[in-house]
Amino acid sequence: MLVYHTMSIVVLILVYLYKVDMIFIVILTQFSS
């Protein structure tokens, strides 16, 4: 059960970082254009 809990936390962190990275890319493209 503890392993499952830590895995879910890792997945949430990865999804959060992915969304932040996408937002950062969008902001960069807005500034470059």
Image: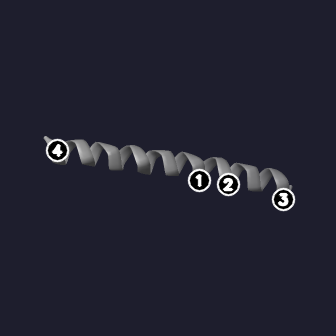
- Element under disc 1: helix
Q: Are marks 2 and 3 in contact (CB under 8 Å)?
A: no
Disc 4 residue crowd, few under 14, some 14–19, many 20+, Cα 10 Å: few
| Residue 13 placement, left or right of 8 | right
Residue most extreme to the right: 33
The residue located at (51%, 50%) in the rendering is 18
Residue 13, position as x, y percentages in the image: 42, 48
N-terminal of the two: label 3 or label 4? 4
For the residues carrying marks 3 and 4, which lies nearer the camera in this image? 4
- Element under disc 2: helix
The residue located at (39%, 43%) in the rendering is 12
Q: How is the image coloured?
A: one colour
Per the model, the C-alpha gap separating discs 2 and 1 is 6 Å
| Residue 7 placement, left or right of 26 | left
Q: Which residue is mark 4?
A: 2
N-terminal of the two: label 2 or label 3? 2
Residue 24, position as x, y percentages in the image: 67, 52
Per the model, the C-alpha gap separating discs 4 and 2 is 35 Å
Q: Are marks 2 and 1 in contact (CB under 8 Å)?
A: yes
Q: Which residue is mark 3?
A: 32
For the residues carrying marks 4 and 2, which lies nearer the camera in this image? 4
Residue 11, position as x, y percentages in the image: 35, 47
Q: Which residue is mark 2?
A: 25
Per the model, the C-alpha gap separating discs 3 and 1 is 16 Å
Per the model, the C-alpha gap separating discs 2 and 3 is 11 Å
Disc 1 residue crowd, few under 14, some 14–19, many 20+, Cα 10 Å: few
